[in-house]
Amino acid sequence: MNKEQLHSYISDSTGNESNICQIYVIKDGETVYDDCWHGFKTEDAMNVNSVTKGVMALLAGIALDRGCINSVDQKVMDFFPDYTVKRGEKTIYDVTIKHLLTMTAPYKGKSEPWKKVCTSQDFTIAILDYLGGRRGITGEFRYATLGIQILAGIIERATGEKCIDFANRNLFEPLGLPKRIPHGNSSKEDQFDFFMNKNPRKYEWYSDPQGSVTAGWGLCMSAKDMAVIGALVSNYGQYDGTRIISEEYLSDMIAPHLKLGERFGYMNYGYLWYKPYYDKDVYAAIGDSGNIIYVNMEKKISVGITGTFKPRIFDRVDFIEEKVLPVIDG
C-alpha cells in the first residue's frame, strides 16, 4: 500500500478507520507523511481525549526537573495544605504523585463522579473529595480520568502559575507549537458539544470555572502537534537540539510500571503512557475515538492520529503498525 492507497483506504472505510481526520508522521526529525480527511487541514485541532493524560505526564516531569516537585514519591496532600479532609479519611495522606501517574491511586465509590465534578466550581477540589477510601492503597490499577485532575492542581500549586501557562511556556512553545488558550465554558451542554462536535476546534484546552485545565481530557491538538510531542519522546526529551525534559524522567515515564489486564490489551503501563508490546520499544499516549501519539524508539518514528467521536475505538497501535508504517518504510 502506498500513500494514495492509504488515503483511499481510510476515505472508503465504514469501520474503525472511518472517523480518522488527520495522520502526521515524523521520522528522524523530518515530516514523512501528512494527510487529512473529512475537510480537516493539517493545522486544525480537535479534542484528543485521554491523549491529554500523556501530555500531563510530560508536564509533571518538567515541573520535577525544575525543582517545583521534589520527587514522584511526594505526597499529594503536601500541595493542598488548605484542603479540609473528610472526617475519618486517612488513606488520602498516603497517596503520592506516582500513584496518580500510574493510575494506582485509590478512590471512593465504584464509578467516577462525573456530574459532581464537572458541574462544580473547582474540578480539582471536587475530585479530591473522592481520593482515598477505607481499602487503603492496594496498588491496583484503576483507570480514573477525573483523578488526573489532581495532577493539574499539583502543578499549579507547585509552580505558582496556571497549568496551561506552564504548558505553553515549557512544552508547546519550545516545540514550536501554537499556544493553547482556555476553553472558557463548562456548562453541561458545552461539555457534550466538546466531545461530540465533529468540526475542527481552536488550539484550546477545556477548563473549569477557575481557569484550571482538565487534566484527563479536553486538550485540543492536531495530529502534527502529537507527532512533534512523540518526536520529543523518541529523542529522550530533546527536540531540535534543545533539552525540554530530562532523559532520566522520560525513561522512567515510559518504563513499564504495571502490567494491565484484558480490558487494556494486556499492555504495560508507565506514567500515563502505554507500552503495547513486550518485545518492541513502542510507546503510546492513547485516547478514545482512536486519538493517539505513537512512538517507535527503534525506528525514530512518531505518529499522531486524530479522530472524531466514535464509540468503542480505543487503540490504533495495530493500525499504525500494519497500515501506516509499511507506507513509510516503503
Image: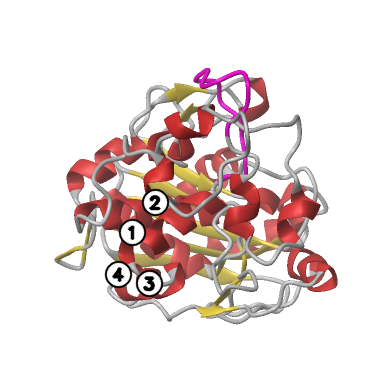
Tell me the quarter of the picture where residue 212 sits: bottom right
Discs 1/2, front:
2
Secondary structure found at label 3: loop
Magenta span: 132-147
Marker count (numbered): 4
The residue at the point 55 percent across, 23 percent down is: 260
Residue that carries the numbered disc 3 in the rendered image: 161
Q: Is residue 139 above or below residue 255?
A: above
Q: Is residue 164 above or below residue 151?
A: below
Viewer-nearest of discs 4 and 3: 3
Q: CA distance from mark 3 to mark 1?
A: 8 Å
Residue 238 position in % (x across, y down): 20, 59
Count residues near mark 4 (Cα–Cα under 10 Å), then give few for <14, some for 14-19, many for 20+: some
Indicate which disc residue 158 carries.
Answer: 1
User: Residue 40: which quarter of the image?
Assistant: bottom right
Return the disc, 4 or 1, that comes first in the chain's sequence: 1
Q: CA distance from mark 4 to mark 1?
A: 14 Å
